[in-house]
Image (cartoon, rainbow, N blue to C red):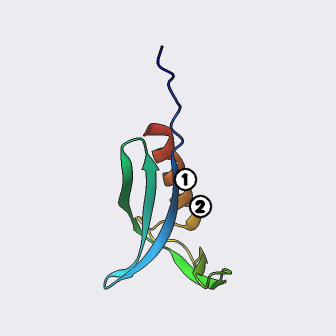
């Protein structure tokens, strides 16, 4: 009898600077391979760097415009992708 292994879905969110402004992207890996998707405009500002020199992002000051995503919103989108993939 063949043993079935449960596939663990892993991923992360990151910000990319585009000509139209900063954008949130999500990248994940599942049983079908690696995937990437743009989530939307990022409402963030840089808050230092990590040990590898990559920027750390935090929610920008002021009220968030409609349609923009905070770091918490982007993380929630990743969790939703992991649940439904």
- Depth check: 3 or 15 in front? 3
Image disc number at residue 51:
none
Q: Quadrant of residue 75?
A: bottom right
Instruction: Please report contact status of discs 2 and 1: CB closer than 8 Å, yes or no.
Output: yes
Residue 44 placed where, x, y %? Answer: 54, 77
Image disc number at residue 76:
1
Residue receiving disc 2? 72
Asked if residue 61 shows in the view, the reply is no
Q: CA distance from mark 2 to mark 1?
A: 6 Å
In the rendered image, the vertical position of residue 69 relative to residue 31, given as above or below? below
Q: Secondary structure at mark 1?
A: helix
Asked if residue 78 shows in the view, the reply is yes
- Relative to 21, 49 lies left or right: right
- Depth check: 2 or 68 in front? 2
Q: Quadrant of the C terminus?
A: top left
Q: Secondary structure at mark 2?
A: helix
Farthest residue, direction front: 1
Which residue shows up at 54% across the image and 48% down it?
A: 79
- Relative to 1, 71 lies left or right: right
Label 2 Cα neighbours within 10 Å, binned few <14 / some 14-19 / many ≥20:
few
Which residue shows up at 58% across the image and 84% down it?
A: 46
Residue 47 placed where, x, y %? Answer: 64, 83
Farthest residue, direction right: 51
Which residue shows up at 36% across the image and 43% down it?
A: 32
Q: Quadrant of residue 28?
A: bottom left
Q: Quadrant of residue 30?
A: top left
Residue 24 placed where, x, y %? Answer: 44, 68
Residue 29 placed where, x, y %? Answer: 45, 51
Farthest residue, direction top: 1
In the rendered image, the vertical position of residue 48 relative to residue 6, given as above or below? below
Label 1 Cα neighbours within 10 Å, binned few <14 / some 14-19 / many ≥20:
few
């Amino acid at each position: 009898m063949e043993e079935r292994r449960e596939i663990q879905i892993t991923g992360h969110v990151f910000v990319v600077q585009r000509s139209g402004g900063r954008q949130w992207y999500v990248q994940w890996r599942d049983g079908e391979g690696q995937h990437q998707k743009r989530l939307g405009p990022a409402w963030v500002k840089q808050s230092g760097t990590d040990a590898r020199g990559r920027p750390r992002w935090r929610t920008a000051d002021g009220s968030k415009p409609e349609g923009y995503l905070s770091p918490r919103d982007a993380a929630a989108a990743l969790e939703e992708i992991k649940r439904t993939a």
